[in-house]
Structure formats: C-alpha cells, structure tokens
Image (spheres, grey):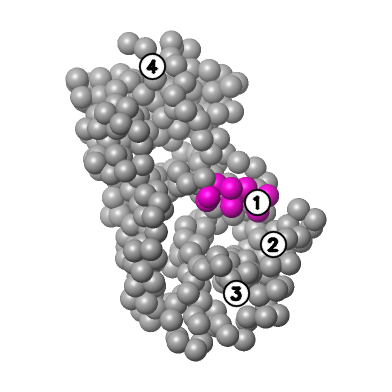
Amino acid sequence: MYQQLSWTNYEQLEELRLKINPNSYTSTLSLLTWSYYGFDIFYEYDQELDVIFFYGRGNLDLKQIESSYTFNKFYNKYFTIFTIYDPKKHELSNIVIEAKMRLKHHFKDQYVNVHGAILFSDYEQYGVCLDHISLYAWVTNYIYVTQDLKTFKGKALQKKRNNLNYFIKNHLDDYELVNYKPDKHIDLVLDFLEQWKAKTVQRAESLLINANLDLIKNTKNKPDFKGSVLFKKATNEVVGFTLVYTRPEIAEILIEQTDRTIRGMYQYLLSTNLINNEINHQLIDRQDGASSSAIINSKRSYVPLYEIKRISVQLKE
C-alpha cells in the first residue's frame, strides 16, 4: 500500500534507492523537496519487483507556478511522478505498464494517466511502447566536477575565478565564513532565509525557500549535512548560507543563498564551503533549476559536466 513521502521516511527510502539503483541520480531527499512545488508525493515499494513507485497529487501550491491548464489537469489527481528500478532487471516499457496498472487500481477515477520524470536518454533509446504524447522535458540534475567548483580553473570558468579573486582582494576582510553548526547557527540561518523570502517576488523562488526552511529544521542533527554561514563582521548578520548533502556516491548542494550584488561573494561561499568541509566526492549535484530561468542560467554558467534530462509523457487510455 502507498504512503506519503515525508521527513520521517525519506532516509529509509534512500537506503532502498542505493540498493536498487545507486545510479538513479535523484535522491529521495530531492524527491521530497519536489513536494514543495505543488505536489503531494506518495510512494509504494514492491518487494518482489524491487521497484519504488512514486505518485504525485497536485495541490493548491501548483497554481502559483503553473498555468491554469496544468493546474486543472493535476489538481487533486494522482499520476506517476517518479520510479526507482534496476534497468538491468526491468525494461522501461514494463515499468510504465506496471505503473499505469497501479494508478488505475489505487486511484480509480481520480488519476491522470501520466508517467513523469523518465530519463530522456532511456526514452530516446528504448521508448515506452504504449501510445502516448510527450508533455514536457526538463533538467533535474546539474552535475559538476567538485574540484572545478573549488578552484574555478580553466578558461570556461575564468570569469568566476576573477570574481572570486576580486572578493578576496576587496571584501574578504569585512566578512567571516564559518562551518555551519546547527546548535549555534540554526535560528540565525532560518531568520536569514525568512528575510530573503520576504524580499523575493518570484513565486518559484518563494517555494524554494519554503523547502529550504523545512530542510534545515528537519536535518539539524544529521551528520550527512555540511554547510557554511557567511557573516558580515560589522553587524554580525548572516549574509550567506550553503548546505551540502554528502551522499555516498555523490555530493548534493541543497541550499546556496547569498547576496549576488557583491561581486564574488557567491563564488567565495560556494568554493570555500567545499574546501573547508572537505567535500571530496568526485562529482557534485546542484539539483534542478527550481522552475526559475535565472537559476537555470546561473547553473549552466558554471559549466556542468553533464545535465540529467527527464521527460514526462501522457499515456493514451
């Protein structure tokens, strides 16, 4: 039977994901943060198939970031939002067929026949065999070489490196970066993000901050999370914060928030956090673009090693 994905069960599911398919890129924690963008997310694990099926259900937050058509299509309706399976054991088409049957069984007339977040490379190579239409494709993961984000070496990242050096030369004496210690810093960081949310005008970014606030509250005693807090010395106020999830196979930057009007401040926060916290994974994931063109363009400007693209399709009855 299915149940709702939450802060109390994502870790158990993450262990399952690593057992089933550690190369599935998107962590169950990332899936949980998706639930802040207009969808309640539910899951069921089929032990015999060794597959996790995730179902989305549109809620009122969806109206803030999607068109009326999309909102009306998904509001209070269930669909397959994600699946985790071993591609060596199962073909994509069989997973899509199984998910379709489960939607109909669980949700009767309260579902829309959509299968979301299929790896685009698998879709191109194998197809889904059933009659369908493509709905939309997007990048769910921007993957970088970790060392590149520590040093910004090379011609492609020269502007980032110049920004970093400018900040170090002209502003560093006015700021202090410290390793994040929840017992000491959590209230300051939460207040910083609340103030940032009050200033934002983009609906997608506001939902992103909501996710970040809950993320901080629910991971404060967990050792897999490492971060840094940037203080302005003159006022002792927080002006930047970043948090990294150190998964076994890859690191994942979950939060990266600071003043972008001061040249080089963001580059300093990003690179120095990775260095100081000894984030030495070969690769690092900066997640998706949070439905924000500004965030997407920023992430692409750091020259990812590759982008993980996914596609959602609607199956014909």
Q: Which mark is residue 301?
A: 1
Question: Percent position (x, y) of residue 45?
Answer: 33, 36
Which span of residues is magenta-colored? 294-303
- Helix, strand or loop at label 4? It is strand
Sequence order check, earlier mark of 1 and 4:
1
Residue type beneath disc 4: Leu
Instruction: State whether residue 210 appears in this view.
Output: yes
Sequence order check, earlier mark of 1 and 3:
3
Q: In which quadrant of the rendered image does the N terminus lie?
A: top left
Q: Which residue in the protein does label 2 denote? A: 160
Decide if residue 53 is on the left or right side of residue 246: left
Between marks 2 and 4, how big is the CA–CA gap?
Answer: 44 Å
Quadrant of res 316: top left
Between marks 1 and 2, how big is the CA–CA gap?
Answer: 9 Å
Q: Is residue 117 above or below residue 251?
A: above
Q: Which mark is residue 315?
A: 4
Q: Which residue in the protein does label 3 denote? A: 276
Q: Is the C-beta separation of discs 1 and 2 under 8 Å?
A: yes
Q: Is residue 71 above or below residue 171?
A: above
- Helix, strand or loop at label 3? It is helix
